[in-house]
Amino acid sequence: MDTHGDAAVTAAEGKAGPDEGTAQTGATVEAAETAGTGRESIGDWAKCSADPHYRDAVVDLLGALAYGELSAFERLAEDAKLAPSLADKAALAEMASAEFHHYRLLRDRLAAVDADPEQSMRPFVEPLDSFHRMTAPADWLEGLVKAFVGDAIAADFYREVAVRLDDDTRDLVLGVMADTGHAQFAVAKVRSAIDREPRVGGRLALWGRRLMGEALSQAQRVVAERDALSNLLIGGAEVRGFDLVEVGKMFNRITEAHTKRMAALGLAS
Amino acid sequence: MDTHGDAAVTAAEGKAGPDEGTAQTGATVEAAETAGTGRESIGDWAKCSADPHYRDAVVDLLGALAYGELSAFERLAEDAKLAPSLADKAALAEMASAEFHHYRLLRDRLAAVDADPEQSMRPFVEPLDSFHRMTAPADWLEGLVKAFVGDAIAADFYREVAVRLDDDTRDLVLGVMADTGHAQFAVAKVRSAIDREPRVGGRLALWGRRLMGEALSQAQRVVAERDALSNLLIGGAEVRGFDLVEVGKMFNRITEAHTKRMAALGLAS
């Protein structure tokens, strides 16, 4: 039952460990390096938020992340019902509880910068709810794959976006991200299910593709509708021009990392 | 949105505060005093658990409490869907997250005393699931009343049972209980709903009665089926004889406290 302690360790080690090596080359490593060594700092929140465009963009971003975490909490708690055992149920509930903790950090930050958390989240309710509606797992294994894939995509996105932020917001975003990896327990379970019944792999591979596809579709919708946020995503505060190519590249890097992760899970995508 | 910090303070103060005075007289105060000043200690876990009957009873108790918390997590997360606003949803999600934390403390304790958490919870799955199935809220206000009433009944039960336990188990149980009060935000919301539309009060009063009735019914079922646990509940380790009257008295004290709390909520029960 104490999956979580070990899983977290595995996940943390996995980032640099030999097992996950293939899944971590390319896009993710590149993103991680950019985040680690960083472009040079664009300044702290006090300095950057003097620009109202920048401020709006960050409030948008925090609102999107906050509702992302709150809706993830809700879906994971719901999907925990599919668990075949109490230990499995508790593992997914643990993840849900971690997402709620993330939500609280983001909400508190919104309040701290005098933004209304509820209002900041509202534009993202419909896209995120749509995503979850379109990807409601049909069974426990689909739920596990979704938990794992969702957690990983979120971490990639946090990492991508962190490099574009002022120091204070970046610290927050990286702090929230550092607490991911709760979904690592899913890996062993999915692998052994495929070992037992290989044709499960085909179905779950399709499922993983669908998850990524729906995520991209909703993300594109947000990009189309939220100019300030999109500007921030593609080039940071100084860039005003809206460049679909840049956004596309970011999505490609995340998709590539996803593909490698699915392979690590034993699923062709 | 930051209901929780304030609510926790209110709840903590409420235990001794003037506002909640009427709701805290009688049974609850009596129970609190017994827990506070205590019967004399029956010894620590190492000493008490040498008696296999005592050990079984405590494992049963921890299993019941653990699944109680896990199923409360699940129901609160589910009921959060009924929330009319994101802030309300987050308040219930926060409560769910706190229940999960309680669950984890209890599960870890079970593991620490070499009991299998899953196996220890299993006998209580059906009674607790039945309770939640019979009391699925039809709307947000029913959900709020259930969250508040459930939290309070749980706290009363923890307090009642704590006085019957060895020092180590008592510390754990009281520690978990100290983190309740997350439901206090519900009080103001229910009160103002009744102010706006007084006939809501009649419906919610019935609902409160039903919640308590179903809780008692499932508790009686557990008492009937789990001898070791029942013995513990009525008299501590030294008592072997099974006394329905003692159990009845305990349930009466909890029911009385519930009645006073419903009145404080503006609901006749």
Image: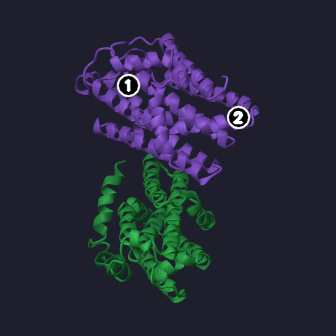
Chain colours: A green, B purple
Tag 2 secondary structure:
helix
Q: Is residue B136 visible?
A: no
Q: Which residue is at 46% across, 50% downward?
A: A93
Residue B31: name its quadrant.
top left
The residue labelled by disc 2 is: B195
Q: Earlier in the sequence, mark 2 or mark 1?
A: 1
Q: Which residue is at 49% across, 44% downward?
A: B4
Q: Nearer the viewer, residue B205 or A180?
A: B205
Bin the neighbour count of mark 1 within 10 Å (Cα to Cα): few under 14, some 14-19, many 20 and up.
Answer: many
- Give the amino acid type for the residue marked by disc 1 in the picture: Ala
Note whether A124 is above or below B107 in the view shown. Answer: below
For residue A262, side relative to residue A13 (left or right): right
For residue B192, side relative to residue B182 (left or right): right
Q: Nearer the viewer, residue A121 or A263?
A: A121
Residue B257: name its quadrant.
top right
Viewer-nearest of discs 2 and 1: 2
Q: What is the distance, in whole Å, between disc 2 and disc 1 at their CAs?
A: 46 Å
Q: Residue B2 location, x and y as percent?
A: 50, 48
Disc assigned to residue B57: 1
For the C terminus of chain B, give its image quadrant.
top right
Residue B62: name its quadrant.
top left
Tag 1 secondary structure:
helix
Marked residue chain, label 2: B
Q: Which residue is at 41% across, 44% downward?
A: B101
Q: Nearer the viewer, residue A178 or B126?
A: A178
Disc assigned to residue A162: none
- Numbered marks: total: 2
Note whether A88 is above or below B242 in the view shown. Answer: below
- Give the amino acid type for the residue marked by disc 2 in the picture: Asp
Q: Residue A177 location, x and y as percent?
A: 38, 65
